[in-house]
Amino acid sequence: MDENELIRRSKEGDTESFSQLVLTYERRMVNYAFRMLRDVSDAEDAAQEAFLRAYRKLDSFHGDAAFSTWLYTILNNICLDMLRKRKRTGEQNQVSLNQSSADSDEYEIQIEDASPGPYDSYRKKAAMKALEEAIAQLSDEHRAVIVMRDINGLEYDEIARITKTTLGTVKSRISRARIALRKILEKDRELFT
């Protein structure tokens, strides 16, 4: 059954069809939320809340944009709200060194040698940790566009719809975020060469 049919049936109250939509997008949504919030539990809560809101507001989805764009818009707003709340309350989100990302497959680096040595494994892990920490240091708006574009692979126009900004603003934010990332990662340059 194609996505449009699942959406149509979900609008008619078919919860099984909506469950299929959730299964299709759940992993990507949790991964995006994790990149924004840096906490697996918060990411899962944010994604669950996004699906809940989407189900309640399904009648407001008219297909003007892709269903995934609509979901990301909802999730992005939830994540930004959670980040603002953290800042207001002074809550700092600490990530344990043992805590893995919500989707560690997302970060695999292809290595020509099928059996990397201990040094290569260490460098790979250190590079990913440095990158995750650098992304966490970006402003909320810059972090959102970098995660959407460079990690989730969304198109610029889709990001513009999600963030409710112009295409020029998205391109500018991505450019500035990449410059900021380069500056932050300068101290760890040897990990990325």
Image (cartoon, helix red, strand yellow):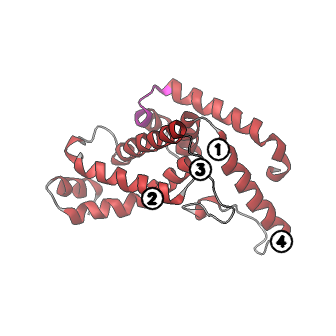
Tell me which residue sits at (41%, 30%) in the image. Answer: 164
The kind of residue on which mark 1 rests is: Ile
The kind of residue on which mark 2 rests is: Glu
Identify the residue under disc 3: 93
Identify the residue under disc 1: 135
The kind of residue on which mark 4 rests is: Pro
21 left or right, relative to 181: left
The kind of residue on which mark 3 rests is: Asn
Q: Residues within 10 Å of mark 4 (few under 14, many from 20)?
A: few
Q: Residues within 10 Å of mark 1 (few under 14, many from 20)?
A: many
Q: Quadrant of the N terminus?
A: bottom left
Ranked by sequence position, the earlier of labels 2 and 4 is 2
Image location (x, y in percent) of residue 85: 47, 40
Identify the residue under disc 4: 118
Tell me which residue sits at (38%, 61%) in the image. Answer: 24
Please tell me whether residue 135 belongs to the stretch shown in magenta: no
Q: Secondary structure at mark 3?
A: loop
Identify the residue under disc 2: 44
Ranked by sequence position, the earlier of labels 3 and 2 is 2
